[in-house]
Amino acid sequence: MKKSLLAALALFSTSIGLFAQEDTASAPSYSVTADVTFVSKYVFRGVWQQDASLQPSIEFAAGGFTAGFWSAQALKDRDAAWSKGTELNFYGGYEFSLPNDFALSVGVTSYQFPKNRPSLGELSNTFEGSIGISGAVGPVSLGATYFHDWDLDADTFEFGVSFGNEINSTVSYEASGTYGLARYDGGGDYDYYSVGLTFSFKLNDRFTLSTGGHWADTDITGLGSNAWFSVGVSAGF
């Protein structure tokens, strides 16, 4: 499955490259961003998923439309992680412009767990929809998003705030914070919160190196907080 997925991504990237060579005078603007990030821990909505993890992704954007693929591949302790540390996400969405530089976004995500173990209660996939609003108030970016997972029958409300600025022409930073409420129809509700600080280094017009520190916690009894770091390289086309 991995070989087929990599081949599909390679074909997709090649097709985008060939399209870019054509006359774009009458074509809509678009972008393709590829990213590979290493994280010392993979934490999702405050809950630990994997230890050291490699997370490649690719995203296509045109106008208000985005579509992409994101993956998490555990590098150790696979048996302790959900689905033996293999997660594949396919997503798409559209953003509508609102007055005062705010935006309304709607999206869907398919979470795929190809190595799930039914005997441990691991699902093979779930499907989630979202709707959110975001915008800037002065130098601060704000966002609020509602998620609904139809397979888990779960509702999540997430609120985020971030602030970033350029240090010089090649270095910038972003500080962010998140608070969320996860609610499950069958029980197991919890709240989560996280903070992070990321620095980005522009290597050239196409490549950017980023590194950051992150912390997250929940109100789940007996579940400790998580701290981790990330290092990644992204390329825009």
Image (cartoon, helix red, strand yellow):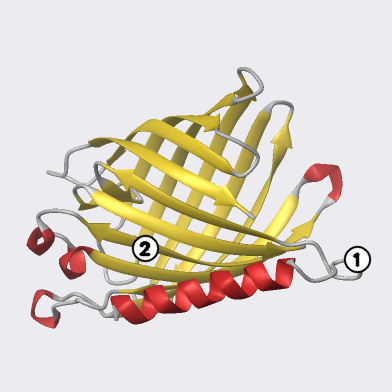
Q: Earlier in the sequence, mark 1 or mark 2?
A: 1
User: Closest to the observer: 75 or 192?
Assistant: 75
Residue at the (43%, 47%) spot, across then down: 180
Q: Position of residue 77 (x, y in %)?
A: 9, 55
**Horizontal placement of 59 versus 205: left or right?**
left
Q: Position of residue 175 (x, y in %)?
A: 50, 28
Q: Which mark is residue 146?
A: none
Q: Residues within 10 Å of mark 1 (few under 14, many from 20)?
A: few
Amino acid on which the number 1 mark rests in the picture: Ala
Q: Position of residue 145 (x, y in %)?
A: 56, 55
- State the quadrant of the N terminus: bottom left
Looking at the rendered structure, the secondary structure element under dot 2 is: strand
Which residue in the structure is indicated by mark 2?
71
Residue at the (21%, 47%) spot, across then down: 52
**Horizontal placement of 116 versus 192: left or right?**
left
- State the quadrant of the C terminus: bottom right
Q: Quadrant of residue 163?
A: top right
